[in-house]
Amino acid sequence: MGHVYVEATIKAKRKLKARFLVDTGATCSLISPALAKRLGMEPSSLREKIHLANGKTVRVPTALGQICIDGRETVTVFWIGPCDEPLLGVEALEALGLAVDPRTGTLKATRPYATRLGGFGKR
């Protein structure tokens, strides 16, 4: 199948388009400190230990940001750490209602909507 890439719009204080490598082995999405700074994304004091593909283990800050792909939008956790290119993790994919189609090497919808909150409203 090869690598799967997707164009996404990410937003914190500022909004930017970025090309993400879809990484179904990553829990959260990973962006570089330089990209986080360009977005005005403020890292929290929480540091998570992650294992990189090169075998290294690092502690990285986390931050919340919005992500939009093909008109589907959600808020997700971003790890801010060393990477050659942004990685799109499975938590963002699940929240967006997207999955990798191994036959086509593209993303496909798993439901007709992105994140949906239930249990709110008048009863």
Image (spheres, rainbow, N blue to C red):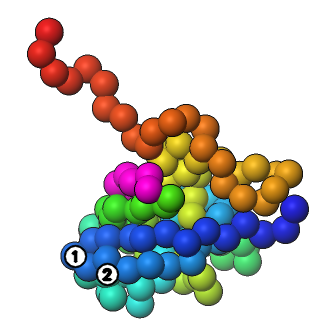
Residue ID at (31%, 81%): 39
Residue 69: % across, % down: 49, 60
Residue 68, how many percent across, how many down? Answer: 42, 61
Q: Which residues are magenta?
A: 71-76
Q: Secondary structure at mark 1?
A: loop
Count residues near mark 2 (Cα–Cα under 10 Å), then give few for <14, some for 14-19, many for 20+: some
Q: Is residue 36 left or right of residue 93?
A: left
Q: Say left or right for 25 vs 79.
A: right
Q: Amino acid at mark 1?
A: Lys
Residue 13 circle label: 1
Q: Which part of the image, by quadrant, shows the N terminus?
A: bottom right
Q: Which quadrant is home to the C terminus?
A: top left
> Does the image show residue 44?
yes
Circle 2 residue: 39
Which residue sits furthest top?
123
Label count reads 2
Could you tell me which residue is drawn at 44 percent across and 78 percent down? 17
Please state if 106 lies on the left or on the right of 122 as rendered: right
Magenta stretch: residue 74 in it? yes
Viewer-proximal residue among 103 and 63: 103
Q: Nearer the viewer, residue 50 or 9?
A: 9
Is disc 1 surrounded by few (<14), some (14 to 19) or many (20+) residues within 10 Å?
A: few
How far from the left and from the top, in percent, is residue 32?
Answer: 48, 83
Residue contact between numbered discs 1 and 2, judged by CB atoms under 8 Å: yes
Q: Which structural element holds mark 2?
A: helix
**Which residue type carries mark 2?**
Leu
Compute the Cα span from label 1 to label 2: 6 Å
In the rendered image, is residue 58 in sight? no
Q: Is residue 39 above or below residue 46?
A: below
Q: In the image, residue 117 lies at what x, y percent?
A: 31, 32
